Amino acid sequence: MALSDLIDHRESSELLDEFAKREIRRATLAAVAIPGYQVPFGSREMPVARGWGSGGLQITLAVVHDDDTVKVIDQGDDDGVNAVNLRRLVTSSTGADESSIASEATLTQSRHRIPEDGLDETSILVLQVPVPEPLRGVERDMRELARMHAEADYSRMWVSLYEDKVRNGVITQTTGYPCLVNGRYVVATTPIPRWDIPRLHNAPFLTLFGAGREKRIYAIPPYTMVEPLTFEDVPFEVENSDGACCALCGKSESFLVSLPNSTTWLCSDTDWCARQRPAT
Amino acid sequence: MGYVSARGGLDAIRAAEKLVRTKRLVSDSNWLEEEQILDKLRLLVDRVMGEAGLWEPQLASKAIRQSEGDATEAVHLLRAYRSTLPRLAYSEATDVNSAQVMRRIVPAFQRVPGNQLLGRSVDYTARFLERTADADAREEAEKLRGAEREIVEEKSPPSEEISPRRLIDLLRDMDMLIDRRRTDDPEPFDITRTPARPPAPRSALLSSMSRADTGALVNQWYRNILGPDGYLHEVTLGEVRHATLPLNVRHPVTGDVVTVTHIRVSEVEAIEDLEGIDEDRTRFDVGYGLCFGHNERKAIAMANLDIACHRDAGNTQLEQSLLLTTDALDSAGFLEHLKLPHYVTFRSMIERKLAVRKMRSNEARTNDGA
Amino acid sequence: MSDTFTDQRFDVARLAIPDWLLKVEGLGKVYGPFDDAVINSTGSGPETAKSPLNGSIVAAWDVSFEVAPGEALGIVGESGSGKTTVLRCLAGDVTPSTGAATIRLGGSDLNMFAADAAERRRLRVDTVSVVYQDPSEGLKMNVTAGGNIAEPLTAAGWRNFAKIRMRASDLLSRTEVPLNRMDDLVRAFSGGMRQRVQIAKALANSPSVVLFDEPTTGLDASVAAGVLDLIRSLLEENRIAAVVVSHDFSVIEMLTSRCLVMHHGRIVESALTDQLLEDPHHSYTQRLVAAARS
């Protein structure tokens, strides 16, 4: 008898073996139990490269069943090429359905955006994380970073916010604004825009963060306090578009991105945009 | 300027895939067989297996062919495939002294028990690019084919052990070696199941380096020797070996130890002089390097960095660099992810710049008004 | 020429102060293995801190004293005397080999040496501050003066930007740092100015204990005089229990009411500062006083 006889040689479209999925689920449960804490996990290599969503993909694959409906977006766009690639990997290996409508999806995997609407208590949001460490800008040594989180010693972060405000007059953090979760851990909110930050606070949906390259999973359970780090007398500012409107749907209530000429604006959430326009 | 929503993401991907696949498979030149890659590009195959952390020469050849020669891409294919495989068993610990050496040199001494065995290496061959015409080269190959049966790869003389006694054993006999052998037998750290972060056990460091990108390890070594923030100096090499090792597993039914395959490894012991303030100047210490296949420069760098990390004892971030910045896929993947759309972030950056300008012009106006 | 106390005056080191805030008992720090024999082979009598028996260095041994709020205790000695070792143990930068250092806060006592690293760091935020000889040890050079002060404030929970700035500017003006330099990087400051910023930072959360390690060494004489003046008035204003370490008796004289003299890791003499200066008993103290007078 050869060892290979013990393996089922059926060609599987599975991207991860069952033990891996179990490991990932356990890590995810630990993350949900300790909101904001970065849980280390044995991140597997995926058919997409490190830095391209391998962490988000692992969480999705570990969590999704064939009766799920999956939405995948990149920069808010269902049709972004990386989103398309990830979506077809998920649907072909899990048998789940796909949809571009957030309220129809049971799980949304996203890079850099939260859908403008449609997420409720039945939704899971999986965010792809390039760098899970919010303190990376103020400290490089990993031993010291571990201590800072363990002791909730975020003073160096506060000093950098103070210096930012002093030097620039405003806090100039762009996307991935550091937030205090459940009053305990500071997290990197991936590069989602500040526009999306308020929707993390007390959200009805579960948010899972997957960092495949750095091999960390963290979570914000539903109805959890999420506070962007800022001084009480320095208001948190979302991106300002000076009242611009989307060239397609005419609305200004969503996060807008501009063309290089910076006079034409478009909704970043393409599905939300499409639903504002009368069906043609 | 009108905006047309580009709904062709899937189409674009499919077109790109078709183009790549067609160009790869269809050409006027001969079909490239896996055997040819295994046979003629053996060192590339070895390197790819080493960086994938997966010993399967046939699969590595397939990956190299599919990746059109991009070593890192081939490594990705292998590692992603590995993720689909269940873990069936753990091997028994292999005694490296049960190796069959094909090449063995010991720079630290002129003569050693078991002899210096140059073996199959281009180290002392002059690097002249051969520009013989293909036809002549094939003719030479045909002529050699007859004689090839008589050229057997030289092995250690039969009177010696198959695996010659190691230099560090000899140093131990001379009482010249710091003894850092453990009396306990801790489980090796499994970097494929738990991410290693400093401070990590030595097994985590060694396995990370064994699977590291070759260029990354060589560069880590070189910049620590000569770079502005480096502080290493060169070691003396003890053993440099290219050898075959058996891979043993307990049979799942009988419980007997069975050899399921043989692997080839490059193995290096690096001897460190120890001139640090708190170190024992009367002895040597040793670093260890081991990787899949014939890849001497990687094993040498690994051995050097192993002892360097031990001597560093956490004073600098050397351990962090070695554990976290030397993986081929992590580094290349993250670098290339910059090609992904980043227009949400970019838009947010522009917005903040405008906000700062506005704040500054407000302040200027206030000051003027005052 | 003896290191025993013959004295008609108070042995200040063994004076029990009823309302002490900081109490150090039997502090010892040895580098290398040691036992009684090793300890006894070192000290003022043997005239060495390094044991001839095994080369271990008894950097400090049997150091005990108490400090009350509002008073400053000096520790004087040349380099190698052990005074800096004592300060670094109290600061938490060095782990002592033996002894206790108790802080009495709001009625409860805490032995700092028995606390874990996290607790020691918390103490450094608002209870025990250190002013180092080299300001770059206590400050972040690439951060503004105001930002350096913001660090302990935010660590203590301050979250109002305007109030942080107000407190920082108060402290800076108290330490005579020009306010128009509040937003300059400390890296751009002169040595004396850096020291003032360090002092301002140390006082940010109104600590109960402040440790000064050679606060003016390395500064020009005129600059040093100004800083000393500042420290003295700050100590007078706040009910701080201060420990001032210096090799310079004139610094001790200016700032402290009592002091200990250390030599080869031991306390060799202790008394009220004035008395010590007027009438030093131990030969080593006499040398130090003479040096200060010249």
Image (cartoon, rainbow, N blue to C red):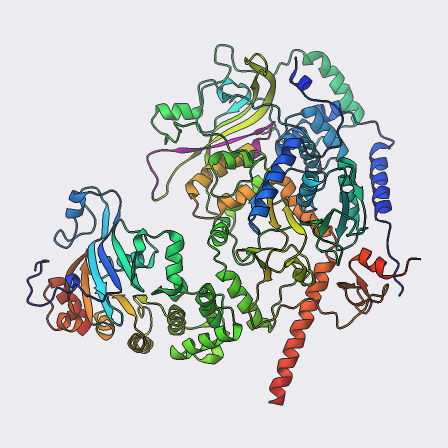
Q: Position of residue B132 (x, y in %)?
A: 75, 28
Q: Which region of the structure is painted magenta? A: B278-298
Say whether residue A185 is visible.
yes
Q: Taking A181 as reference, is B109 above or below it?
A: above
Residue B292, magenta (yes or no): yes
Q: Residue furthest right?
A: A280
Q: Is residue B131 left or right of residue B55?
A: right
Say whether residue C41 is visible.
no
Q: Is residue B178 left or right of residue A167?
A: left
Q: Residue furthest bottom?
A: B370
Q: Where is residue B77 in the image (x, y as percent from the top left)?
A: 71, 34
Q: Position of residue B243 (x, y in %)?
A: 56, 22
Residue A239, magenta (yes or no): no
Q: Position of residue B142 (x, y in %)?
A: 76, 16
Q: Residue at x 46, y 48 (%)?
A: B316
Q: Is residue A249 left or right of residue B362?
A: right
Q: In this view, does C235 lie to the left or right of C137?
A: left
Taking depth in this image into account, of B370 and A65 the one nearest to the observer is A65
Taking depth in this image into account, of C290 and C107 the one nearest to the observer is C107
Q: Residue at x 56, y 18 (%)?
A: B248
Q: In which quarter of the image is residue B356?
A: bottom right
Q: Taking A54 as reference, is C63 above or below it?
A: below
Q: Residue furthest front?
A: A121
Quadrant containing the N terminus of chain B in the rendered view: bottom right
Taking depth in this image into account, of B292 and A48 the one nearest to the observer is A48
Quadrant containing the C terminus of chain B in the rendered view: bottom right
Q: Taking A46 as reference, is C251 above or below it?
A: below
